[in-house]
Amino acid sequence: MAAGTLYTYPENWRAFKAQIAAQYSGSCLKVASSAPAFTFGQTNRTPAFLNNFPLGKVPAFQGDDGFCLFESNATHYLSNEALHGSSPQAQSQVLPWVSFADAEIIPPGSAWVFPTLGIMQFNKQATEQAKEVKKVLFVLNHHLNTRTFLVEERVSLADISVACSMIWLFKQVLEPSFRQPFPNVTRWFQTCVNQTQFKTVLGEVKLCDNMAQFDPKKLSDMQPKKDSLPKKDTPSKKEKAGKEAGRPQEKKDKKEEKEAAPAEEEMDKCEAALASEPKTKDPFTHLPKIQTRGKTL
């Protein structure tokens, strides 16, 4: 049975997958998501952490025996055979659903949900495109029309991966009117998150009543404050004045160069190429001069 520590930040849905898998398999998993065990942005930049996880990303799993896995690959390692599938056919069906979550749900889901959480800037076009996740939901809804779970009649890694990738969608933006065409998806999701193993990790998952919108204040609050950043040493006014007085000519030369620069910058590539070519000589300069009626030609 696997045992070790999972490093992550709080409420990381990627880490939820490994935690839920460990609940099903009985693996002994310690979660380091707060100080002093782990501080995101600090601990994952230390030489000791980067020595085990060169990318510095989380979730990251380190076994008690020193075995290390980065990202959410620990989910498979921490699970048991029942979660993998009871037959070769079932096992081969689980993997496509894991990929389905990563490729079809997470990208649009993140583009839609993250701005509502203040994690990233709002982009109207990107958000409207992300709402096309409904095409994915139609596929999922059709598949679940005659099934309780995605593969076989019990929870597998397929359900854990897909359900976790949809947690924030259901909590933030999939309001009743949006999810109404997908009753099978909603029924399946609620069945999953109400399993004891899911609830131990996730707690009570409440589906949103209204679609969350982008809030500029949230985004501002999530950004690091300027006052909290280390201040650079700046020279005093007297020191600055002394330095400037010591090299007046240099400053003047730089100013003249700066004033001359725009004329060069205004040239496009074609003009610059033409300007760099040598000037063409008069093709008749090598011919002897001819006298005619008192004039030299």
Image: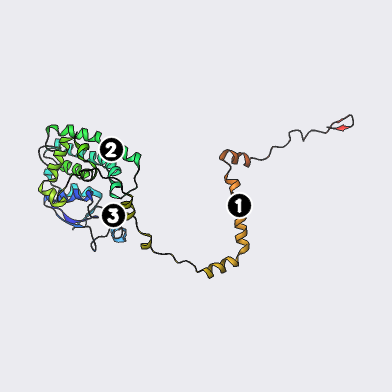
Q: How many other residues sit within 10 Å of disc 2, few (<14), some (14-19) or many (≥20)?
A: some
Q: Which residue corresponds to the image point at 33% horizontal and 50% vertical from the top-left?
A: 216
Q: Name the residue nearer the viewer: 264 or 49.
A: 264
Q: Which label was assigned to residue 259?
A: 1
Q: Quadrant of residue 283?
A: top right
Foreground mark, 3 or 1? 1
Q: Can residue 65 be seen here?
A: no
Query: In this figure, what is the number of numbered marks?
Result: 3
In which quadrant of the rendered image does the C terminus lie?
A: top right
Q: Which residue corresponds to the image point at 47% horizontal and 66% vertical from the top-left?
A: 234
Mark 1 element type = helix
Label 3 – label 1 distance at C-alpha = 50 Å
Residue 249: where, in percent of width, then height?
63, 62
| Amino acid at dot 1 | Glu
| Amino acid at dot 3 | Phe
Q: Is residue 250 above or below residue 14?
A: below
Q: Which label was assigned to residue 53?
A: 3
Q: Is residue 67 above or below residue 281?
A: below
For this orientation, the residue located farthest to the top is 293
Q: Is residue 44 left or right of residue 153?
A: right
* First of labels 2, 1 by sequence position: 2
Foreground mark, 3 or 2? 2
Q: Is residue 252 left or right of residue 32?
A: right
Mark 2 element type = helix
Question: Which residue bears the numbered disc 2?
Answer: 131
Label 3 – label 2 distance at C-alpha = 34 Å
Q: Name the residue nearer the viewer: 282 or 138.
A: 138
| Amino acid at dot 2 | Lys
Q: Name the residue nearer the viewer: 281 or 140.
A: 140
Q: Is residue 19 above or below residue 191?
A: below
